[in-house]
Amino acid sequence: MNYLSNSRSGVIPVKEMLIHIEYLINNKKHLDALTECNRLLNADRNNTEAKLLFNRVSSLMNTKMKILESADESFNKKDFKSAGIFYLNYIKYCDDIECDFINAKLQFIQDRIPQLRKRKILINTIYTVLLITILSSLGFLAYYYIYMQEDREFAEIENGDSTEDVKIIEHQIVKYERFLRKYEDGKNKDKAREKVSALSEIIAEKIYSDDWRTALTYVKKIDNKESPKTYSDLLKIVRNTATKEYKQHVNLAKKYDKEQKFPEAKNEIDKAMSITEEFSASDMETNKQILAENRILLNKKIKLIIKFRDIDREISDKSDELKRITPVSNNSDIVILNGIIIKKSSVNIYIARDLSTKKLVALKSVSENYNQGDDFTLQCIKSGKININDDTGNEMILPFYKVFSDNDEFDKNYEKDALIQRLGYLKAEKEKIDSLLHVNLL
């Protein structure tokens, strides 16, 4: 088809139509060119030149629209520099009318860029100032909270110092000691040690008379090198107070010992020993040795008193048993005599000392001969009293005992002899134990 019908001019040759489309393209009237291409192709779908022009116009319009989209997007984001570049590229695809519109935008952009540049400089300046302020603040905070932390903590503790209230002083000492553990090599360690020493001196002076143990604890916190006299004086005062309490325990222990309350006496010795442990060996070495010996003696006495009571109980039982096997008629006069021979007075008669009463008695024994110093335990008949002359010729009236085995009514048997022998042994043991129990404490 070489012609295309037109309602206004009738028939237009296709070649002229194609030339017209070329003209529109060259004048950047792409939309009109695209319309003409569509009209031509509607009349002749197989027109190759029309298709080429259609594709050409379509490609130009797509490129144009993409540039415009990028330009508008940059413009809306106020990225005027990028938008200006895109709009300049876009003008290459615009006709005169569109160019005027785009130039107006470019003029706006040119006016805005210096303002934006100034604004950017201002904003950057503000940001820089803010950044410097923030960094300075962070630096100050780091200095205050990190570098100055030790000083701040020390000052905070120091503000709570008191010289009147004992509890507050104790609490402050604990705080300073905790501070020293935390800042072992800190710059305030010497000040903290001085505080501990000074506060310990104050509290020791206040409480030594009521609680010398706690006072001693604080005396040991005083710096002996910096305050040797203060340390020495306070230690002496505390030691004197402790010595008074020590003597009280020792005296009470001796009192209990005499009353044969040996566990109570040992308890007091232990309390006195605990006092000596609070001081160095040089201060109470002698006292410690004495207390150790007293403790050993009391331990022996505690064991012996049990044995003593067992022996005493057995003596009573054996005596009762011996009386039961003795003739009834003589029970009232028969006794167990435990004694020691003092001297021989006459034939078969001896002067002896009754170990149970510590008194002198006269003993008649026909079957046995005794020498001075012999001890005995015998079943005897109490026979009133007898007159005996002493070494100076003075007459003594002594209780008179006859050995029961010398009596004609005595019926010897093994059981009685065994009982008498056992009683003699028990009484001898009782005498030994009793002598140990009466050993005084040092």
Image (spheres, rainbow, N blue to C red):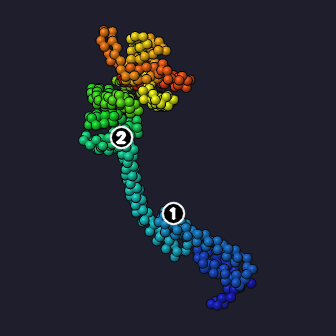
Q: Position of residue 180 (x, y in %)?
A: 38, 37
10 Å crowding of disc 1: few (<14), some (14-19), many (20+): some
From what the image shows, is residue 155 above or below residue 436?
below
Locate residue 396 relative to residue 297 in the image: left or right: left
Q: Locate residue 298, reporting x and y percent.
A: 41, 27
Residue 274, quarter of the rendered image:
top left
Camera-nearest residue between 181 and 304: 304
- Above or below 348: residue 379: below
First of labels 1, 2 by sequence position: 1
Is residue 195 in sight in this rendering? Answer: no
Mark 2 sits on what residue?
A: 174
In the image, taking residue 326 as reference, residue 66 lies left or right, namely right
Q: Is the residue 332 above or below the residue 174 in the image?
A: above
Q: Amino acid at mark 1?
A: Ser
Give the amino acid type for the residue marked by disc 2 in the picture. Answer: Val
Mark 1 or 2: the one toward you: 2
Furthest residue in direction left, as rendered? 164
* Residue 10: numbered disc: none
Tag 1 secondary structure: helix
Q: Nearer the viewer, residue 345 or 190?
A: 345
Instruction: Identify the image quadrant of the C terminus.
Output: top left
Q: Would you name the residue on which mark 1 appears? A: 82
**Could you tell me which residue is drawn at 55 percent across and 70 percent down?**
68
User: How packed is label 2: few (under 14 Cα within 10 Å), some, or many (20 or more)?
Assistant: few
Residue at position x 43%, y 13% in the image: 348
Q: Nearer the viewer, residue 213 or 45?
A: 213
Task: Residue 379: give x, y in percent of width and height.
Answer: 46, 23
Question: In the image, is 1 to the left or to the right of 72?
Answer: right
Q: Quadrant of residue 385?
A: top left
Quadrant of the rendering where the N terminus is positioned: bottom right
Residue pictured at 51% horizontal, 63% vertical: 82
